[in-house]
Image (cartoon, rainbow, N blue to C red):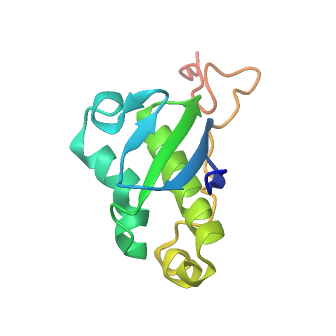
Amino acid sequence: MAKIQYYGTGRRKSSVARVRLIPGKGNMTINKKSLDDYFGMEIVKREVNRPFEIAGVVGKYDMIATVNGGGFTGQAGALRHGISRALCVANAELRPALKDAGFLSRDPRMKERKKYGLKKARKASQFSKR
């Protein structure tokens, strides 16, 4: 018998998270590590768990995710986005609550590109009149 799985892809900054939700007991695996081992900071762990809390399905799904690119805050945001999308696939009635919380919209903020003639995106060398 094949297991029921729900997929969602989340993105934030340069991070991409591929999320699988499987009905289970609430185990969370990110890149073959547990949530506590992968993310050290408590606030980042809370960010990843927020979609489950808002949907009211804490402990009902096991999550297996693959995340790459970016730093830990970008990866946490990508995971939140992917989990929210997968929950919508699992149960369409959860969509309004997740949408009101802003978890289904992709955060468009990216790093600005470096421009020629400047040291960074906006940093220029110091101006001197003489």
Work out which residue is located at the far top of the displayed protein and give it. Answer: 130
Residue 77 in picture, x, y percent from top left? 49, 49
Q: Which of 57 and 50 is in front in this view?
A: 57
Position of residue 35 relative to residue 100, above or below, is: above
Number of on-image labels: 0
Position of residue 80 relative to residue 39, above or below, is: below
Residue 103 in picture, x, y percent from top left? 52, 66
Could you tell me which residue is drawn at 43 percent across and 74 percent down?
A: 55
Position of residue 78 relative to residue 52, above or below, is: above
Quadrant position of the C terminus in the picture: top right
Question: Which quarter of the picture shows residue 24?
Answer: bottom left
Q: Nearer the viewer, residue 49 or 57?
A: 57
Work out which residue is located at the far front of the displayed protein and give it. Answer: 1
Question: Which quarter of the picture shows residue 57?
Answer: bottom left
Residue 29 in picture, x, y percent from top left? 43, 37
Could you tell me which residue is drawn at 49 percent across and 28 percent down?
A: 31
Could you tell me which residue is drawn at 65 percent across and 37 percent down?
A: 112
Report the side of 75 relative to 130 (left or right): left
Report the side of 70 relative to 40 (left or right): right
Position of residue 62 relative to residue 56, above or below, is: above
Could you tell me which residue is drawn at 40 percent across and 65 percent down?
A: 52
Work out which residue is located at the far right of the displayed protein and give it. Answer: 116
Work out which residue is located at the far left of the displayed protein and give it. Answer: 42
